[in-house]
């Protein structure tokens, strides 16, 4: 066991820190601290430019293999990058769905032509992606989806509706789960289609959230088309592909959040000290409790990285989403209790950040698999309990 | 950065697991409620475990917390009726004050050194070659001690209220108590794992409404919540072991975290396991209560959740940095 970083790892940290310090300047400087969860619709153009800056520096696709054009960074290097990224308060990534979800899925299931067409623009930050899974009647029960795609010559023609599609309004592309099989039902006959957003058959209607802004949208497909070769994985065999993507969403790609969480908690401790809430032993205990829970989250993530103990770890890895979602929800609630009576009014500055945090964190236990669904999965897969 | 145990560390764990599976079934724990199990100490001594963290010139293996933490977890798993905490905690203290003869006797199981827990109890003090205690932040022997026997809620434990002439020695009190809390935390993780296993197994076999109760979502979610606590407590314990071994500046904070997490995991898992068992879990005849009672005693000993949360709270509020 060695919980410290090696000299080589520290060198890498220095490289990241230096690069961020040298590039988060000029127009990019004002993006610091913006565009994170709950704020994803802020400075979109500028953040896409930043995505491209990262791409030029070789800092996108860190986790991707070298064949895919990525850096092939080790897991520890990824952690270091994410920690430094958060420490510098660099902006929320506009390209996170492409980099974290679609890219790895294309790399795993795509044809050579698809890899050649789609991976490089994600790395360069020139194409932004959104995820078209959920529908009005298919939330937790994704296999109830109804959007259809019918083959017409060289194209698929798509009809149906997606909902809660994050970043749909700024995306060039959407990966859409649709029914393609004749007599398709439940998990059978679903395909994963890559669909251009700027076409007549696609209409995006932003949905305003509890936070007051709109990060997600309804997406209507009304005779939208995409070429037949834009199916990832087997036609009618897209369920497996979708599950692979979800595993990414619930697993490793959430690691970076912890570094942001650390910033948020640190800021909250400061507010509590400044406004005197920290003198209340109840508040102190809850701050300490959240601090500890955040630390064990990091330890669990670090442990998952150590290949040796793999045999024991899948259980822990499965629990990660449930754990951080609940943590973040609790942080939001504590933030309001730290504000006390001021929690009822909206003001610029610290209070504003805390309100945004509180409101956004109302959604953590819902997206990417609700807490209840996570528990069902863990009971059956980690504990082997009967269905 | 490598957060994993070595091959040897895992082999030692596996070896102990297989020997305890044979030698320490729940019937042996139950028997120790009637008659103290003196033999188990000797069996552990023969496997080198009582001397694991003694220096070689006291007949020990010269190993550290990373080497014993998994072993303590195994002993917790079977609720082994043996006082490992006192021995693993005091061994380095004995070595530090040059009591090598006594230390080597402890390592062979011939002698036992008791340690007064901050709550004021010392287990098996009547059979101890000496009683160590911490008073006003200093370590010392309690000489000419008077003992008042108490009855533990866990029938395998024999606590005494102790008092005596305090004879200070030159040893670090924080290190001593941190080690004790860490052994307790590791045992608590083991206790939790077994209680969860018991409940999962039971939920698969017990049928109501025509199906196994484990297929009911409410039952599943009880046990997932328990698994979650355990899965996140274990890394906190392992990390604290590394911090103790490397004298990390935040080691006490790490130990406190480990103790808080392990205690809460064990208390919570006990409660959930009992609920899932229904009335059978509430009986004296069924094993669960022995694990629960050990968990209750260990979570209140060596600094309870309140005490350790407070220690972490002070660190956090003072702006302490911890990677
Ligand atoms: C901020 C945000 C961003 C999102 N972004 C995207 C996106 O980009 N792309 C996308 O495709 N989707 C997105 N979603 C949608 C998200 O995946 C769904 O909200 C989620 O899967 C839950 O579905 P639902 O909202 O329809 O709730 P429902 O499935 O209707 O659930 C309602 C309640 O019932 C419970 N429930 C349902 N089934 C069970 C069961 N079997 N056992 C126990 N309880 C159950 C749920 O846990 C929940 O409490 C986003 C959602 C949010 C909040």
Image: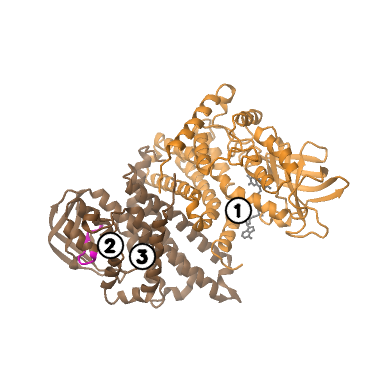
| Element at label 1 | loop
What label sits on residue B75 in the rendered view?
Answer: 3
What label sits on residue B5 in the rendered view?
Answer: none
Secondary structure mostly seen in magenta is loop
Chain depicted in brown: B
What label sits on residue A370 in the rendered view?
Answer: 1
The location of residue A317, given as percent across then percent down, is 53, 53
**Looking at the image, which residue is at 38% across and 76% down?**
B284
Can residue A137 be spotted in the picture? no
Residue behind label 2 places its C-beta within 8 angstroms of ligand 1? no
Quadrant assignment for the C terminus of chain B: top left
Magenta region includes residue B116: yes
**Viewer-proximal residue among B165 and A189:** A189
Can residue A209 be spotted in the picture? yes
Q: Is residue A161 left or right of residue B307?
A: right
Q: Is residue A152 left or right of residue B267?
A: right
Instruction: Identify the magenta region.
Output: B108-119
**Viewer-proximal residue among A197 and A332:** A197
| Element at label 3 | helix
Chain where mark 2 sits: B
Magenta region includes residue B301: no
Above-or-below relation of A36 to B275: above
Give the number of the mark in front: 1 or 2: 2
The residue to which callout 2 is attached is B50
Give the number of the mark in front: 2 or 3: 2
**Looking at the image, which residue is at 25% across and 69% down?**
B158
Chain depicted in orange: A
């Amino acid at each position: 066991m060695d919980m410290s970083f090696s000299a080589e790892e520290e060198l890498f940290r220095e490289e990241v820190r230096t690069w961020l310090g040298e590039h988060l300047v000029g127009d990019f400087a004002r993006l610091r601290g913006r565009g994170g969860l709950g704020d994803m619709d802020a400075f979109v153009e500028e953040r896409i430019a930043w995505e491209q800056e990262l791409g030029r520096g070789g800092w996108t696709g860190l986790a991707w293999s070298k064949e895919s054009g990525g850096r092939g960074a080790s897991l520890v290097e990824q952690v270091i990058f994410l920690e430094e990224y958060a420490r510098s308060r660099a902006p929320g990534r506009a390209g996170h769905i492409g980099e974290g979800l679609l890219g790895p899925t294309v790399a795993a299931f795509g044809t050579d032509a698809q890899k050649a067409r789609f991976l490089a623009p994600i790395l360069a930050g020139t194409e932004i992606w959104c995820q078209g899974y959920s529908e009005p009647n298919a939330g937790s029960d994704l296999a109830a989806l109804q959007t259809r795609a019918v083959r017409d010559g060289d194209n698929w023609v798509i009809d149906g509706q997606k909902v809660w599609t994050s970043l749909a309004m700024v995306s060039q592309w959407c990966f859409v789960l649709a029914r393609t099989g004749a007599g398709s039902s439940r998990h059978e006959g679903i395909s994963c289609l890559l669909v251009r957003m700027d076409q007549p058959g696609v209409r995006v209607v932003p949905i305003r959230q509890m936070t007051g802004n709109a990060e997600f949208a309804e997406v209507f497909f009304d005779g939208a088309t995409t070429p037949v070769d834009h199916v990832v994985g087997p036609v009618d065999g897209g369920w497996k592909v979708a599950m692979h993507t979800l595993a990414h969403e619930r697993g490793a790609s959430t690691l970076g959040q912890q570094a942001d969480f650390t910033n948020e908690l640190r800021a909250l401790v400061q507010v509590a000290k400044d406004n005197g809430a920290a003198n209340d032993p109840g508040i102190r205990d809850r701050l300490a409790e959240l601090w500890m829970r955040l630390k064990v989250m990091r330890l669990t993530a670090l442990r998952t990285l150590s290949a040796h103990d793999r045999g024991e770890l899948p259980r822990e890895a499965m629990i990660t989403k449930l754990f951080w979602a609940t943590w973040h929800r609790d942080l939001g609630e504590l933030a309001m209790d730290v504000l006390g009576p001021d929690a009822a009014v909206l003001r610029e500055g610290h209070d504003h950040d805390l309100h945004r945090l509180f409101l956004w964190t109302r959604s953590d236990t819902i997206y990417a698999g609700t807490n209840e669904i996570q528990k069902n999965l863990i009971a059956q897969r980690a504990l082997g309990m009967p269905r | 950065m490598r957060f994993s145990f070595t091959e040897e560390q895992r082999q030692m764990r596996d070896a102990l697991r297989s020997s305890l599976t044979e030698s320490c079934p729940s019937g042996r724990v139950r028997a120790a409620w009637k008659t103290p199990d003196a033999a188990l100490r000797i069996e552990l001594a023969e496997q080198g475990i009582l001397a694991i963290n003694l220096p070689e010139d006291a007949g020990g293996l010269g190993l550290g917390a990373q080497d014993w933490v998994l072993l303590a977890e195994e002993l917790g798993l079977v609720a082994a009726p043996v006082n490992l905490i006192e021995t693993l905690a005091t061994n380095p203290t004995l070595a530090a004050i040059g009591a090598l003869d006594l230390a080597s006797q402890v390592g062979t199981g011939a002698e036992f050194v008791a340690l007064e827990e901050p709550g004021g109890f010392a287990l098996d003090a009547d059979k101890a070659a000496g009683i160590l205690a911490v008073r006003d932040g200093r370590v010392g022997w309690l000489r000419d001690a008077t003992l008042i026997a108490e009855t533990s809620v866990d029938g395998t434990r024999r606590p005494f209220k102790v008092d005596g002439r305090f004879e200070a020695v030159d040893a670090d009190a924080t290190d001593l108590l941190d080690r004790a809390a860490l052994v307790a935390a590791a045992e608590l993780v083991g206790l939790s794992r077994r209680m969860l296993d018991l409940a999962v197994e039971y939920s698969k076999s017990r049928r109501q409404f025509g199906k196994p109760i484990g297929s009911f979502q409410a039952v599943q979610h009880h046990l997932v919540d328990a698994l979650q606590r355990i899965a996140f407590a274990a890394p906190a314990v392992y990390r604290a072991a590394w911090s103790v071994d490397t004298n990390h500046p935040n080691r006490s904070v790490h130990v406190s975290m480990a103790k808080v997490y392990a205690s809460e995991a064990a208390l919570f898992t006990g409660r959930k396991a009992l609920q899932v068992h229904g009335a059978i879990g509430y009986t004296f005849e069924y094993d669960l209560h022995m694990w629960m009672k050990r968990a209750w005693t260990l979570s209140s000993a060596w600094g309870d959740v309140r005490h350790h949360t407070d220690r972490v709270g002070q660190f956090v509020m003072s702006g302490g940095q911890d990677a």
